[in-house]
Amino acid sequence: MTGAAGFIGRPLVSRLRETPGARVLALERSSVALQALDGDYWRKLGVGTIDVIFHAGAYIPKDAASADLVKPIVESNVNGTAALLASLPNTPRHLVFVSSVDVYNRVGERTIDETSEVGPATLYGASKVFGEELVRSYARSTGCNYSILRLGHIFGPGEEVFRRVIPNLIRAMLRGEQPQLSGDGATERDYLYVDDAVGAIVAASTLPGKIDPINIVRGESISILNVAKHVAELTGYKGAFCFSGHNGDSLRFDNGAMKRTLGIHKFVSFADGLAREIAHFRETEFATR
């Protein structure tokens, strides 16, 4: 699998290594750049056959400002995906491509499902659209089965590397600092715990045929203000919140296809997942404070 050291990759590798008889070859950016992959790489490793590819490796923006950086996005997400597919020593049984709900045109407040209009607002989202097309092209030419999974807003231990709403709130409140919320906090987001996302990815790899695409989302949205209240309760923060700027578009997703096709019906509750993420912060960044 690619992206083995990432937010999704680490727990995915752990889950795969629990599979009896499985041999997991985990690629991460520190060991090989995706765009540098070729047939010689696999031959040197003695790899002649790959059963399933989990392609989770990508340049993922750490914040809104980096979602349009041309060089890293094109090199990793476009050239890297093309090089990976061209380098494979055989046609795998199944190829799982980790895409993103950032491929959708998200203007307006509506429920997004797999039939919703594709129209990414950033280069990162566009790179995921192109990656999906590369996978489809590869499948047409080889007959490979594949799954295109559009991951939503995933949260949990490991997302602290991103400047996102939840880690920003946790970090501020654990420091006793006043957390910043946009607008009046009414903007809604759909949050799915990372272990549930990993379970969906693994489930997709076991199915025959083509799964194209499926949104990997909870199917329930929560306001940013309520997220902040949850964080305050779990961290013991007693101060006020700071509100500034404007609300963004609220995002709501339909997870019917995920439930029907992958059989994913039970999720870690938002409160339990948040408690686990806060515990992770306390054990890492705030362990000596």
Image: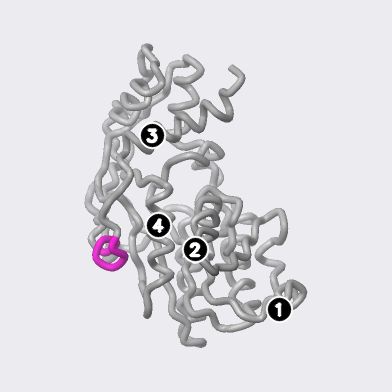
Between disc 2 and disc 1, the foreground one is 2
Q: Position of residue 55 (x, y in %)?
A: 53, 65
Q: Determine if residue 26 is in view.
A: yes
The amino acid beneath tag 3 is Leu
Asked if the stretch drawn in magenta spans residue 246, the answer is no
The amino acid beneath tag 1 is Gly
Sequence-first tag of 3 and 2: 2
Q: Position of residue 1 (x, y in %)?
A: 57, 64
Judging depth in this view, the residue of 76 and 68 nearest the camera is: 76
Q: CA distance from mark 3 to mark 2?
A: 27 Å
Residue 46, picture quadrant:
bottom right
Q: For numbered disc 2, what is the local secondary structure?
A: loop
**What span is colored magenta in the figure?**
257-263
Q: CA distance from mark 4 to mark 3?
A: 18 Å
Residue situated furthest top in the rendering: 239
Residue 39: assigned label: 1
- Residue at 68%, 76% in the rendered image: 47
Residue 199: assigned label: 4
Between disc 3 and disc 2, the foreground one is 2
Residue bearing the label numbered 3: 274
State if disc 1 and disc 3 touch (CB < 8 Å). Answer: no
Judging depth in this view, the residue of 225 and 285 nearest the camera is: 285
The amino acid beneath tag 2 is Thr
Residue bearing the label numbered 2: 19
Q: Position of residue 278 (x, y in %)?
A: 45, 30
Sequence-first tag of 2 and 1: 2
Between disc 3 and disc 1, the foreground one is 3
- Residue at 45%, 77% in the rendered image: 136
Q: Counting other residues with Cα less than 10 Å from the Cα at mark 1, is it few (<14), some (14-19), or many (20 or more)?
A: some
